[in-house]
Every structure is written in C-alpha cells, then in structure tokens.
Amino acid sequence: QKEVEQNSGPLSVPEGAIASLNCTYSDRGSQSFFWYRQYSGKSPELIMSIYSNGDKEDGRFTAQLNKASQYVSLLIRDSQPSDSATYLCAVMGLTGGGNKLTFGTGTQLKVEL
Amino acid sequence: SQTIHQWPATLVQPVGSPLSLECTVEGTSNPNLYWYRQAAGRGLQLLFYSVGIGQISSEVPQNLSASRPQDRQFILSSKKLLLSDSGFYLCAWSEGNNQPQHFGDGTRLSIL
C-alpha cells in the first residue's frame, strides 16, 4: 500500500464547475496536510495547508480533512482553464520528527472550455 | 519575505561527469532544507534533508551527496553521474517541523 494515494486522472471538468480531488494516507499519526499545484515543467506551488479535521477555505479552494478516515480532499470552485495542472497531496507523518513530507503521485486536472 | 534560489535551470552533462547544484534561501534563518528528484511522469522522491549546518539525512542510497556549508545554502553533488540521474531536481525549504515546504524553480538535468 502506498503511503499517500491519489487517482492519477486525468480529471476533466467543465469551466465553472467544482473540481474534487481526493487523497488517502496510511500513517494514522500524520499531523499536517498540504496541497500543491504543479504546472507542466514547473515546480510545485503550495496552495493549501490543513492541520485539523474539518474544512478550510481560501478563495476558490477548500481543503477537507478527516483523520478518522485518513482522507484529505481539495475542492476547487468555479474551475478555470488556468487551474489545469497536476495537484499533489503531501502528508507530514511522524517519521523524521515532522520534517519529512510524503507526496502522492498527483492528480492531473483538466478544465475544459 | 523569503525567497529560494536554485541554479542552473537546465543542465546537460555526460555520463561519468561530476555534478554540483546549489540552492540558497533568503529572508529566514535556520531553515529546514530539502533536495528532491522528480523523474518524468513520476512523483517527488526525497533525496536529502537538513535541519541545520552540517546535518544531512540521506533518504535514498545512491551516488549523490549533499552538503550544507552555510545556514541557508544547500548543495547537491555527484562525483560520477549515471544515466539514471536524469530528472528534475528541486530544492525546498521550510521554517521547521510540520511546516509546509516551499520549492525553488528546479534544475532539469539531462545525462547523455
């Protein structure tokens, strides 16, 4: 079982729709959770951090965390073509003393006109 | 504000040649520093991380090494590159434990 799992996609959504990206993790003691956006050929860019159960909203982005189910998701409202990218879920576990992130392999999102 | 600089942006090297990639961070002190590699179409692989000057943790045994000669400088090296060393190398920093990591622009390394 992979430590952090994401559906590779591509996930295609029409412009203006809600895109829902999901991630599961295996380390039950994980404390910190992050979503990164990576455009093709570019480096990952942090878009959301979440540390406690529930929802966290930032503009069009909402991160959702359920530690009991070991599940974290990212919702993108009013999706735009510029949101087309690969979204990486990253989890900070107990190993490494909270210094090491484990990344999923990413979900490719395509927002279609 | 904090910034991270990584160079060069692209590099083409022959097999067996040495490598030195440099990363520096500005606007913070005693950051955690990281080197990752991303092979084409693959996920991010943590290579090394450092929580302080001279402290290096290696995650994957291979022909690469890392050094942290100054607080905000992180260097990735190799004495002899292999074909399998090709990839996108990313440096990142964080403020400390359980904090998000912020990436540099990366170096795209091609081995011929």
Image (cartoon, coloured by chain):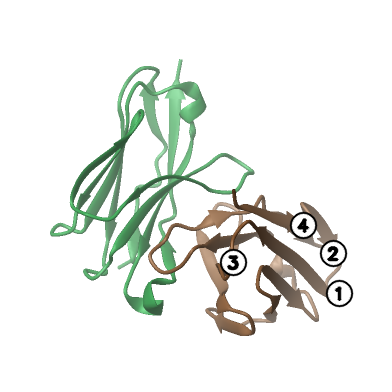
Q: Which chain is green?
A: A
The mark closer to the camera, 2 or 3, is 3
Name the residue furthest left: A68
- Is the residue A66 above or below the residue A10 in the image? below
- Between B4 and B40, the one lying in front of the other is B4
- Which chain does tag 2 point to? B
Q: Residue flagged by tag 4: what amino acid is it? A: Trp
Marked residue nearer the N-terminal end (2 or 4): 4
Rounded to the nearest whole Å, what is the CA distance between mark 4 and mark 3? 20 Å
The mark closer to the camera, 1 or 3, is 3
Q: Is residue A22 visible?
A: yes
Residue identified by numbered label 4: B7
Label 4 Cα neighbours within 10 Å, binned few <14 / some 14-19 / many ≥20:
some
Marked residue nearer the N-terminal end (4 or 3): 4
Q: Is residue B42 visible?
A: no
- Which chain does tag 3 point to? B
Look at the image and tell me in which quarter the C terminus of chain B lies.
bottom right
Same chain, labels 4 and 3: yes
Residue identified by numbered label 1: B17
Same chain, labels 2 and 3: yes
Rounded to the nearest whole Å, what is the CA distance between mark 2 and mark 3? 33 Å
Q: Is residue B30 left or right of residue A78?
A: right
Marked residue nearer the N-terminal end (1 or 4): 4
- Between A24 and B93, the one lying in front of the other is B93
The mark closer to the camera, 1 or 4, is 4
Rounded to the nearest whole Å, what is the CA distance between mark 1 and mark 4? 18 Å
> How many numbered badges does the structure rendering display?
4
Q: Determine which of the numbered discs, if any, sits on residue B13 in the image.
A: 2
Q: Determine which of the numbered discs, if any, sits on residue B29 in the image.
A: 3
Same chain, labels 2 and 4: yes
